Amino acid sequence: MAIGITVKFEIKAGSDAAFEAGFAKAAAAVKAQDEGCEMYDLYKSVDSPTSYVMVERWTTQALLDAHMKSPTMAGMAALAPHFAGAPSMAKYEVA
């Protein structure tokens, strides 16, 4: 069963370019190296320029679990200095 993930980020004002560049680099590594990744995209709010949502899709829970333990997660952790608060994550089964 495919798994969908959303992660909401609020970033510090003025961090958008660095956050987006860092995300693009991290996402490219995830898409290239982590088996089962079908989507790993970032969306910027049109109403609030410091609000973002990341949408992920994984073919199985097991492959998502492997991704969460993979070295590619270091690229995502490197984005933390740009956060204005803790990200919030939600997990879904793809219907």
Image: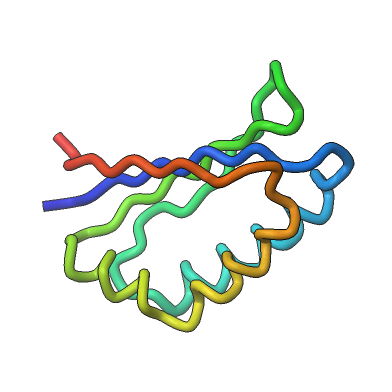
From this viewpoint, which residue is outermost toward the top? 47
Give residue 55's position: percent from left, percent from top.
44, 43
> Which quarter of the rendering shows the C terminus?
top left
Q: Could you say which is closer to the camera, residue 10 or residue 56?
A: 10
Q: Is residue 20 shown left or right of residue 52?
A: right
From this viewpoint, which residue is outermost toward the bottom? 71
Give residue 64's position: percent from left, percent from top.
28, 64
Color encoding of the figure: rainbow
Give residue 19's position: percent from left, percent from top.
74, 53
Q: Is residue 36 shown left or right of residue 23?
A: left
Q: Determine which quarter of the picture holds residue 23.
A: bottom right
Give residue 11's position: percent from left, percent from top.
71, 42
Task: Write the residue at 28% across / 44% down.
Answer: 91
Task: Write the residue at 34% across / 40% down.
Answer: 90
Numbered-mark total: 0
Q: Could you say which is closer to the camera, residue 35 or residue 12?
A: 12
User: Height in image: 62 above or below 8?
Assistant: below
Task: Write the residue at 69% across / 21% down.
Answer: 46
Q: Is residue 91 shown left or right of residue 23?
A: left
Q: Could you say which is closer to the camera, residue 71 or residue 88?
A: 88
From this viewpoint, which residue is outermost toward the right? 14
Q: Determine which quarter of the picture holds residue 80.
A: bottom right
User: Height in image: 65 above or below 24?
Assistant: below
Q: Determine which quarter of the picture holds residue 69.
A: bottom left
From this viewpoint, which residue is outermost toward the front? 85
Q: Is residue 69 shown left or right of residue 41?
A: left
